[in-house]
Amino acid sequence: MTRLAELVLRRARERTGPGTMDATATDRQRWQPRWLRPTVAGLWCEPGRFYIDPTRPVDRAVITHGHADHARPGHRSTLATAETAAIMRARYGDDAGPVESLGYNVPLSLGDVVVRLVPAGHILGSAQVAIEYRGCRVVVSGDYKRRPDPTCAGFEVVPCDVFITEATFGLPVFRHPPDSHEVERLLQSLRLFPERCHLVGAYALGKCQRLIMLLRRAGYDRTIWLHGALVNLCNVYARAGVQLGPIGTVSGGARRALAGEIVLCPPSALADRWARAFPDPVTAMASGWMGIRQRVRQRGVELPLVISDHADWDELTATLDDVGAPGVLVTHGREEALVHYAASRGYRASALSVAGFEDEDD
């Protein structure tokens, strides 16, 4: 637990009095569905006989989106959106196994439950999983954001009885600036330093393509150059109808001729020998974590760009109120503060421990 999270919890207990947080945990046993529970392999839906984003190979998996900590290969049967299926095949080839695609908001019976995949707004093909069983509807958000994103379908609010939400940026300190503001900072730096290459670290799936589209919307119509590791997934987006504009692949000695250009690369490449051949590069990184000074220093980033594919604190809390589920379960992130917020709003709230998810370079 971070020091900030500890402070939030301590202040929460001071306001609510002793025993309140424990009472919430006890009350969970009365409202958390017993038929949907975490296991060592992932979140298990017993009446449907499937796992959601399992951490190891299983007989039947329902996948929320294509990031590697959610979409793992090797399952005997996988259900996902068509776009997530394409991402899995591009990343894993034959190891992706059989993947059945399901359109958004198309009901499908699995065992004794009805499942729908609903847009999550995180990346291309990302989905919430809405599960209905014996009059109870549970929505598993997966990763999501609420901001407009031209590369994917926007988040849809689904009223439900229990909402299982991520909390990657689940602390009040995380309030991301407008995307347009951060892109303008990059373009302004390009105008100030036309003799320098601008080398931007961006996660290969989702962030890279979104940053390209944000630049296009800001009027940048020149070629955007890509590290070779980003090309494959950009091609997946292009085949899905996302028009990225002119892009090129960086190769060999061409790096020395890219003064005044924007080059996107995996975050790990910023510290690699590969980066040294560019003309006096401005090292930048696009991530929600760039709002944390320590992470900026650790990465050695000169131009931090706070652009996230996850909901920030305001978006997380607004989503709880928009969904209005009486029960809230908070998982893979900074659970404590969001649980306290939900409880203060009258929701029955608790943390749900689901192992296997990581802090992406977001």
Image (cartoon, helix red, strand yellow):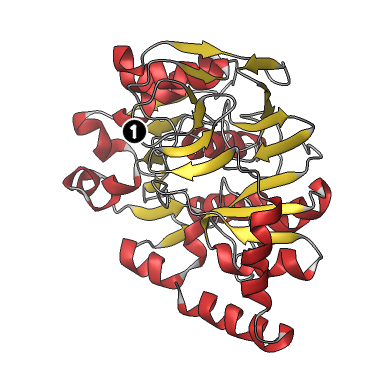
- Pick the residue in front: 32 or 149: 32
Q: Is residue 18 above or below residue 226?
A: below
Q: Residue at x 61, y 34 (%)?
A: 216
In the rendered structure, the answer to whether residue 252 lies left or right of residue 133 reads: left
Q: Amino acid at mark 1?
A: Arg
Q: Residue at x 39, y 66 (%)?
A: 295
- Residue 284 in view, yes or no: yes
Q: Secondary structure at mark 1?
A: loop
Q: Position of residue 72 (x, y in %)?
A: 37, 29
Q: Residue at x 51, y 11 (%)?
A: 100
- Pick the residue in front: 59 or 238: 59
Q: Residue at x 34, y 47 (%)?
A: 267
Q: Quadrant of residue 204?
A: top left
Q: Is residue 169 above or below residue 23?
A: above
Q: Position of residue 247 (x, y in %)?
A: 45, 25
Q: Which residue is mark 1?
A: 56
Q: Position of residue 254 (x, y in %)?
A: 25, 31
- Pick the residue in front: 104 or 78: 78
Quarter the N terminus occupies: bottom left
